[in-house]
Amino acid sequence: MIIDAHTHVWPDKIAHAALSGNRLPGLVARGDGTVDGLMQDMSGSGVDASCCLGIANEARHVDRVNEFVAALRSPERFGFGTVHVELSVEDNLASLRRHGITAVKIHPLFQRYALNDPRLWSIFEAFGSDIAVITHVGEGGSVEANALSNPGMIRDIARQFPDLRLMACHFGGYKLFDDAREILEGVDVVLETSWPPSLATLRPERVRQLIQRHGAERIVFGSDWPMTSPVEEIAAIEALGLSDDEVKLVLGGTMARMLDIPSPWRR
């Protein structure tokens, strides 16, 4: 059971504008950002379920994004909601509960707050182990935006909140692979594999070494659709030279455990 831990979709009428507005420099979208587009790519790639990650760039949009994400819920889609530090902890939690959301996406580049912001840590403390968190980490914007997240911040969050179900996108540091490997290898945090424009741009032996040292039980596959092609990213995982058991954990077993859903690959 292949689970893509990292996709983005928007309502049809705003998908093009949202995708254009959130596009990172130098990247060209491979999909259209719509739900139908995602489902078509899932069918063509063999992905059984996708995590659809909602992001509210501004606090005033949090509840509307969570409403949209909740409506995506199906056997093939798992909605990740959003929070924002300019709302109170209570207001953030109320929105998640109102819409039955049990996982959120944090994106410092677009939301413009740092992973070590005390207001965000207050939200994490309130989450306990009840709400899973997946967050962008690393570069992709201006110098100022890039400073909002780094592997060291992920290490500190993992240490401060040991019960938090934390996942760090892009191996814990987009364009900071060596720093992420040095700082996060062995830390009790789950790392996600997306690396736009493709995981295949990284040397496979470096990726394989990180996965095996960190443990495949702490790695989840993510494509970052629509910025990449899921079928190509799955092929890149399968070409790393991992064992069959390691591939199954990365492609779905670990994420099934993080989401607490059944899977023949979960352990």
Image (cartoon, helix red, strand yellow):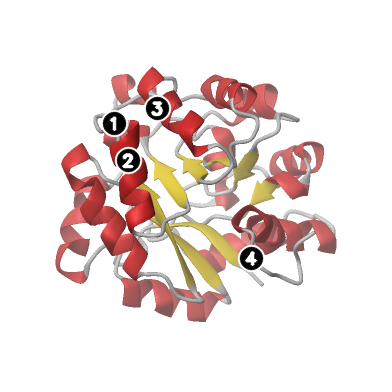
Determine the CA span between mark 2 and mark 4: 25 Å
Task: Residue 129: name its quadrant.
Answer: top right
Q: Residue at x 42, y 77 (%)?
A: 39
Residue 184 seen in the current view: yes
- Viewer-proximal residue among 64 and 24: 64
Classify mark 3: helix, strand or loop: helix
Q: Confirm or deny contact between disc 1 and disc 2 (CB under 8 A).
A: yes
Mark 1 belongs to which amino acid?
Answer: Ser
Left or right, 165 with reference to 225: right
Residue 161 lies, in percent from the top left, at 59, 27
Q: Which element carries disc 4, helix, strand or loop?
A: loop
Q: From the image, tell me which residue sits under label 3.
A: 120
Q: Secondary structure at mark 2?
A: helix
Q: Inspect the image, locate mark 4, and give the three-letter code of the amino acid beneath it.
A: Ile
User: Which is more N-terminal, label 3 or label 4?
Assistant: 3
Look at mark 4 in the image and give the residue it sits on: 261
Circle 2 sits on which residue? 92
Q: CA distance from mark 4 to mark 1?
A: 30 Å
Asked if the residue under mark 1 is in contact with the one under mark 3, i.e. CB atoms within 8 Å, the reply is no
Q: Going by the image, does 112 lie left or right of 21?
A: right
The foreground one among 242 and 88 is 88
| Discs 2/3, front | 2
| CB-based contact (under 8 Å), mark 4 and mark 1 | no
Q: Secondary structure at mark 1?
A: loop
Sequence-first disc among 4 and 1: 1
In the rendered image, which quarter contains the C terminus?
bottom right
Name the amino acid type tagged 2: Asn
Label 2 vs 4, first from the N-terminus: 2
